[in-house]
Image (cartoon, rainbow, N blue to C red):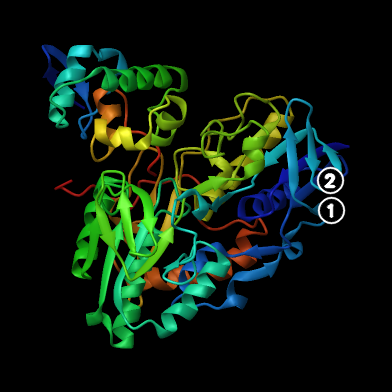
Amino acid sequence: MATRTIAGKTVEVNEEGFLINPNDWTKEIAVELAKEEGIPELTEAHWKVIEFCRKDAGATGKAPTLRRITTAAGVSTKDMFALFPKGPAKKVARISGLGKPEGCV
Amino acid sequence: MKKLLILGAGTAGTMVANKLSHLLDLEEWKITLVDQDATHYYQPGFLFIPFGMYSRSDVVKPKRDFVPHGAELILSSIAEIDAEGNRVHLADGRVLSYDFLIIATGADIHPEQTPGLAEHEWGRSIHTFYSFEGALALFKHLQTWRGGRLVVNVVENPIKCPVAPLEFLMLADWFFHEKGIRDRVELIYATPLPGAFTKPIASKLLSGLLEEKNIRVEPEFMLEHVDPDAKKLVSYDEREVEYDLLVSVPLNMGAEVIGKSGLGDELNFIPVDKHTFLSPKYSNLFVLGDAAAVPTSKAGSVAHFAVDLFGENFVRHTEGLEMQPLFDGHANCFIESGFGKGLLIDFNYDTEPLPGRYPLPGVGPFTLLQESEANHWGKLMFRWMYWNLLLKGQELPLPARMSMAGKRMPATA
């Protein structure tokens, strides 16, 4: 496992840059990871999705898939692609300090 | 008599019925299978039908032939699963009570979930090989197709047999070469994944192979709708891919009755413990095969390894002992790559597909993540093993849990 320092905090990350321990996550880290994912600023709409993902993962133990987010958080797929371009579920999972969603096996 | 009810007599349901009929005392246990369809399909064979390599008789047999002695098969669709009341309501009004329930109702395609997909062009310029009828229709279509742009699209993951779309493309490359029209065919793979496959090492190697075969990948393509008149795919981020022939892998979902009975997730797959298949909610309910929401491939080999380990674990459970976390997500898939060759991948929850040899380290005869003729023959031989050994619950000379022996980690990974 590699460690790196994000927003002044040293955390463990896997080879794809996902946080190993979701408890290491802070809002400051989210802002930095979002920048790396090409999102310069996290708006209220972004935070709504991030908070849903954190909460859902806390309950289920895994990052939600895109379909889970759109069904349970009431955000349309179209909006998810506007907020987190390209792979929204993967992007939001990384920004939220969660593992890669298990939809793709 | 204790009653074991198995819903679904497909690959997983049939295998587990056979396995448990050997392990349980049938003087004490009554095993009942329920399925709506009298025909068992060898689903891995659907891939070969469009190219004329397999025909109807290769992939179809009566389900009755595989029901173990002493077990009963009821042909009916299921109206509702009442897990609180330990009862299952059949569509014909019958009610079956159970002591233990195994759900193996599988996954199926839902083209109607994508706008434009299953409309007036379905069966004309839009096809699928993810159903028996679809594969036969595509065979007919390819007989007279004169070339153009062929796009294979996966609508959303998870899908049954995640390597099948790649195999289809590589076989298409070979098929059109043989027909002498490869130069008039463009092959494109539009996938929601960032690359050719889900796991990094395999994805890299498979991408290289696709490139060699002049198959273009359109990654991170999440289909929003199909425009059947303009013949194009439109993604959520407004990218467009035009086609002359669309081969679709539509949205895969679990059985409708799962959703109706309140047992499933958004796609009607049922969450269970990924090592034991026991429901976290009901201590007498298990889910095997594609119907389970577990993070491994939806594939027959996975169901086979799972059933292998499940049998004795289930017996422990019925005796009041704690189940052991045996299943490791083991999947083992032959990947046809055309021109009489194939690849093989072997992986589990924790270990991604790696290069090497299988099942004997250094010897094979199969090569992992590398093309060989042996792999192609392995894939063809597998059909015989499926009908004659696998479904009947007989032991294969392969370990059910994944082994690292014979695998190596590439230096540049």
Query: Which chain is mark 2 on?
Result: B
Q: Are marks 1 and 2 on the same chain?
A: yes
Look at the numbered disc 1 and give the secondary structure of its residue.
loop
Left or right of residue A82, residue B345 in this image: right
Residue B379 place in picture, x, y as percent: 45, 68
Residue B49 in sight here = no
Left or right of residue B364, residue B259 in this image: right
Q: Which residue shows up at 84% across the image and 53% down it?
A: B70
- Vertical order, B225 against A38 (above or below): below
Q: Which residue is mark 2?
A: B26
Between label 1 and label 2, give the one nearer the viewer: 1
Amino acid at pointer 2 = Leu
Residue B217 place in picture, x, y as percent: 24, 58
Residue A10 in sight here = yes
Residue B276 place in picture, x, y as percent: 57, 34
Distance of label 1 from label 2 (alpha carbons): 7 Å
The circle drawn on residue B14 is none
Q: Which residue shows up at 69% across the image and 53% down it?
A: B9
Left or right of residue B188, residue A37 in this image: left
Instruction: Look at the numbered discs 1 and 2 and tell me whether their residues touch, using CB distance below 8 Å.
Output: yes
Within-10-Å neighbours for mark 1: few <14, some 14–19, many 20+? few
Q: Which residue shows up at 38% across the image and 61% down it?
A: B165
